[in-house]
Amino acid sequence: MNKQAKKQMQNNNPILVIGAGSWGTALAIQLARAGNPVKLWGRDESQMQRLASERCNERYLPGSSFPDNLLVCKTWSEAMRDYAEAGYRSDSEVDGSVVVVGVISTDSRVDLSADSEVNADSKTNFSPRILVSVPSHAFRSVLDDIRQSMGSRAQTLELAWATKGFELDTGLLPHQVAMQVIPVCKKIAVLSGPTFALEVGAGLPTAITVAASDEQWAVNMANALRTKNFIAYTSSDMVGVEIGGAVKNALAIGAGLSDGLGFGANARIALINRGLRELSRLGLALGAQKETFVGLAGMGDLVLTCTDNQSRNRRMGLALASGKSIDEASAEIGQVVEGIGAARAVYEQAQKLDVHMPIIEQIYRVVVEGVSPHQAVEALLDREMSASAEH
């Protein structure tokens, strides 16, 4: 790597991606492709060792090799080395030769010992950037770990997440959880939109939304992701973007149920359209902006998740319609199916706010109460027969 490329890399803050599942890995690859120094950490140390040696996540993203500027961290202490309360730490504490600023493979790490000017700038102009990509049930605990590790440095943290869904125990959205756990962190953002990890990992054209209350942080995060094949738009509507990501997973189970029962394309598009109405009603009740729900994080994400079998939630619906249990379907899918918890959380929010969501109610009855898919569909059709107006 030449000196100019080295300086350009150093001028970018390193980004730590927490969560080495399919989506976290895909985002880490994308950030690295866009020229950022990136670190990737996951809780399974043996898995992280495999990723480090193979330079690919064969389990979730087979064939998507890691760029050289993506460092796989095997331990939490390694992942947080640059971000701990003591401040920016150099590897001189370990081998006296390099400063870890992102992902550098063992045979091509950037030696800054001869470049004191860049080294000094890196130490003084460093704001920690972390992107969390874990299931919603693990989000709070990960943020708590970050807070404890960073201490007073958390007030300079630039935090983003790709986590979707309400917290089950509290009914809070991810941004509300973040504000509770790390209140001193003022730069927070959510990433969402119609994306499948396999396609992002493969470098196929993709568009997402980055929403933040701090406009500049949204722009910076979007720019960090952008390449020719990856477009990131910005928004100020964190509530709307998070609602879209939460509700669509439950509705995708419904779409899978409908298709699995053989109801055809007409029924599928009716479910998607009416589901979007339900999603919008809940979002507006929680203070979201109406325009968000016709954008990428609303209609876009909903249509994609409901219509393509890359969606784990859609596949769950298909499996349930075939007579499999949730446990059997989950084992077959082999990854967390967020729509199961989302159906409960969204239904409870709708009940609390008195928001009419009949499709969500029937999905809830199937995945939580154990009602058969046929019974749920019959109940939904009976209710819709009495509807006289579309809106």
Image: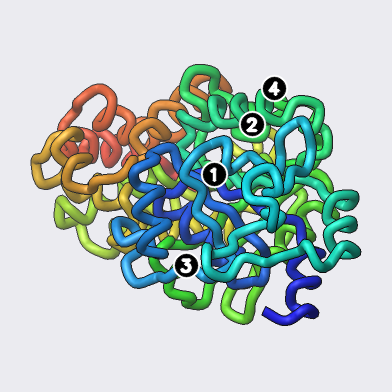
Q: Earlier in the sequence, mark 2 or mark 4?
A: 2
Q: Residue at x 53, y 69 (%)?
A: 107
> Is there CB contact under 8 Å for labels 2 and 1?
yes
- Quarter location, residue 287: top right
x%, y% of residue 251?
A: 38, 45
Q: Which residue is mark 2?
A: 146
Q: Amino acid at mark 3?
A: Phe
- Rounded to the nearest whole Å, what is the CA distance between mark 1 and mark 4? 19 Å
| Residue 154 higher or lower than 277, as above or below | above
Q: Residue furthest front?
A: 96
What residue is rendered at 83% in x and 50% in y?
126
Residue at the spot of label 4: 180
Q: Nearer the viewer, residue 223 or 342?
A: 223
Left or right of 181: which side holds 114?
A: right
Q: Give the number of the mark in front: 1 or 4.
A: 1
Separation (CA) of disc 2 from disc 3:
25 Å
- Amino acid residing under circle 1: Ile
In terms of sequence position, does the residue under pointer 2 or pointer 3 come before the other? 3
> Is 277 placed left or right of 85 in the picture?
left
Check disc 4 and give the amino acid type: Gln
Q: Which residue reaches farthest left?
A: 323
The label on residue 66 is: 3
